[in-house]
Image (spheres, grey):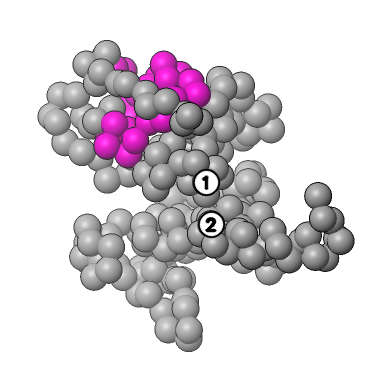
Amino acid sequence: MAKYKQGTVKPARYAKIASIMDRIEAAFLDNLGHILSRGQLLEVARDPRTGEEPENWHQRLSELRTDRGYTILSKRDDHDLKVGEYVMPTATRRTSAARRMRPTEKAWLAALDRAGHSCEWEEDGSRCSLQDGFTDPIGGGTVRLTPDHRRPHSDSPASDPEDPECWGVLCPRHQVMKKNYWDDTTGKINVMAIIQAAPRKVKQQVYAFLRRYFGDDV
């Protein structure tokens, strides 16, 4: 028997709700404990007036978790879910959730100047360097540089909005890749976030290692 049932959404039901995040929130609350697919969430997020599909709908999904404190499960949290499936198990919200801070305009411009108005992500000694308006050669779509919490929002939600050194400059693809994997200011690795995002085979390897480490045969 399937662990979760498929939810249903009627986009017209949410047409009078102004913001993308509020529409997605309403859809989840109407389908507690049921699966909503990526396609269903896109339909809800679509602008009810123009029919345009927003590029940043997945960021609003992230903010439901971080800013509003909801638990939203995906495949990285529950192996019974497929890629592109999401479940809000309850309407309970974490009281520790804090609204996501953003840099002031002055701090953001200073961060952009420091970064040369390009993505600061570095990997294997090379820098991404994509700029606003470029086409992402890997992920596709038009690049819009966004501020990145150098100290993860989940660890320190009150990053100083006036200090440009608290903010990195990333393209959308590398914002998603970074998630909350590490804290740029301390080098602290968020092991739980890495394990959550790992494929099931890697999770099994970690599980087997921990059983050996703790001598737990249960």
Tell me if 128 is positioned left or right of 151 in this view: left
First in residue order: circle 1 vs circle 2: 1
Instruction: Work out whether residue 89 or residue 114 is closer to the camera in this orientation and state it.
Output: 89
Image spot of residue 3 (x, y percent)? 50, 31
Q: Amino acid at mark 1?
A: His
- Image position of 179 with respect to 30: above or below: below
The residues tagged by marks 1 and 2 sit, at their Cα atoms, a distance apart of 7 Å
Determine the residue located farthest toward the right in the rendered image: 215
Residue 142: quarter of image: bottom left
Q: Which residues are magenta?
A: 14-42
- Residue assigned mark 2: 200
Q: Amino acid at mark 2?
A: Arg
Residue at horizontal 36 percent and vertical 57 percent from the top: 172
Image spot of residue 23 (x, y percent)? 35, 23
- Image position of 88 with respect to 173: above or below: above
> Exactly how many numbered labels are in the figure?
2
Image spot of residue 157 (x, y percent)? 63, 44
- Residue assigned mark 1: 79
How crowded pointer 1 is (Cα within 10 Å; few <14, some 14-19, many 20+) is rated as few
Q: Are marks 1 and 2 in contact (CB under 8 Å)?
A: yes
Residue 46: quarter of image: top left
Residue at horizontal 32 percent and vertical 33 percent from the top: 41
Label 1: state its secondary structure.
loop
Q: Is residue 26 visible?
A: yes
Residue at horizontal 13 percent and vertical 29 percent from the top: 50
- Image position of 98 with respect to 110: above or below: above
Q: Is residue 110 visible?
A: no
Q: Is residue 104 magenta?
A: no
Q: Which mark is residue 211?
A: none
